[in-house]
């Protein structure tokens, strides 16, 4: 796509306005909903700004499906993706599914709204993995975002994957002026 990647846009122009973050998030959750509702479901497993392409019409699309997996089972156990955007359960290799992509997309919302990696910078990959996989922490939610956007990020980055919304539920939250309740199931 002619606009390059989100990572390139952020490096050239800095953080995005929240209205654009919301527009891009709707597109991304729609794309994830499509992937996650295939039979069998497709897990992207490497959602980050560098793997999201921008169109000149202010649309975005997921790209780089090199880590993707079609999964008939409910839990995948391989370590795939980019550490700062990776869900804790992926790092622990404890079995994961579609909700790992939701975590990563929550991290991308942070990335788009700060022009920084979701956890800030780490001295090394091992330190990042220990903090993300073994602590009770979640990535810092930017204070300058609206309460609705902060709530969405907090929902997407809950430590317990079962507590995270689906892509469809997340898209509904982004689109509505008032957040709708999340129904897990």
Image (cartoon, helix red, strand yellow):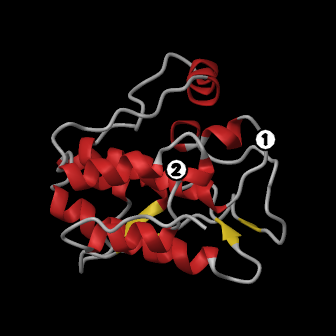
Residue 65, by quadrant, is: bottom right
Residue sitting nearer the eye, 162 or 79: 162
Q: Secondary structure at mark 2?
A: helix
Residue 63 x/y as whole percent: 53, 67
What residue lies at 50% left-to-right and 43% top-to-bottom?
158
Q: Quadrant of the N terminus?
A: bottom left
Q: Which mark is residue 94?
A: 1
What residue lies at 24% left-to-right and 75% top-to-bottom?
58
Q: Which mark is residue 115?
A: none
Residue 48 in view of the camera: no
Residue sitting nearer the eye, 111 or 131: 131
Gap between marks 1 and 2 measured at Cα = 15 Å
- Residue under circle 2? 103
What residue lies at 61% left-to-right and 53% top-to-bottom?
162
Residue 171 x/y as whole percent: 39, 71
Q: Residues within 10 Å of mark 2 (few under 14, many from 20)?
A: many
What residue lies at 17% left-to-right and 50% top-to-bottom?
146
Q: Quadrant of the C terminus?
A: bottom right
Q: Residues within 10 Å of mark 1 (few under 14, many from 20)?
A: few
Q: Is residue 108 left or right of residue 46?
A: left
């Amino acid at each position: 796509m002619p606009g390059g990647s989100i990572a390139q846009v952020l490096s050239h122009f800095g953080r995005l306005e929240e209205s654009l973050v919301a527009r891009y998030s709707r597109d991304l959750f729609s794309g994830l909903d499509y992937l996650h509702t295939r039979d069998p479901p497709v897990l992207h497993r490497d959602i980050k700004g560098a793997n999201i392409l921008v169109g000149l019409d202010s649309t975005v699309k997921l790209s780089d499906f090199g880590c993707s997996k079609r999964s008939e089972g409910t839990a995948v156990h391989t370590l795939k993706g980019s550490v700062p955007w990776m869900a804790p359960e992926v790092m622990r290799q404890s079995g994961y599914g579609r909700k790992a992509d939701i975590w990563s997309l929550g991290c991308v919302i942070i990335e788009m709204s700060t022009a920084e990696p979701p956890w800030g910078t780490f001295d090394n990959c091992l330190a990042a993995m220990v903090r993300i996989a073994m602590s009770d922490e979640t990535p810092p939610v930017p204070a300058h975002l609206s309460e609705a956007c902060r709530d969405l990020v907090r929902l997407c980055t809950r430590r317990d994957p079962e507590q995270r919304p689906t892509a469809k539920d997340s898209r509904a939250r982004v689109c509505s002026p008032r957040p709708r309740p999340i129904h897990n199931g």
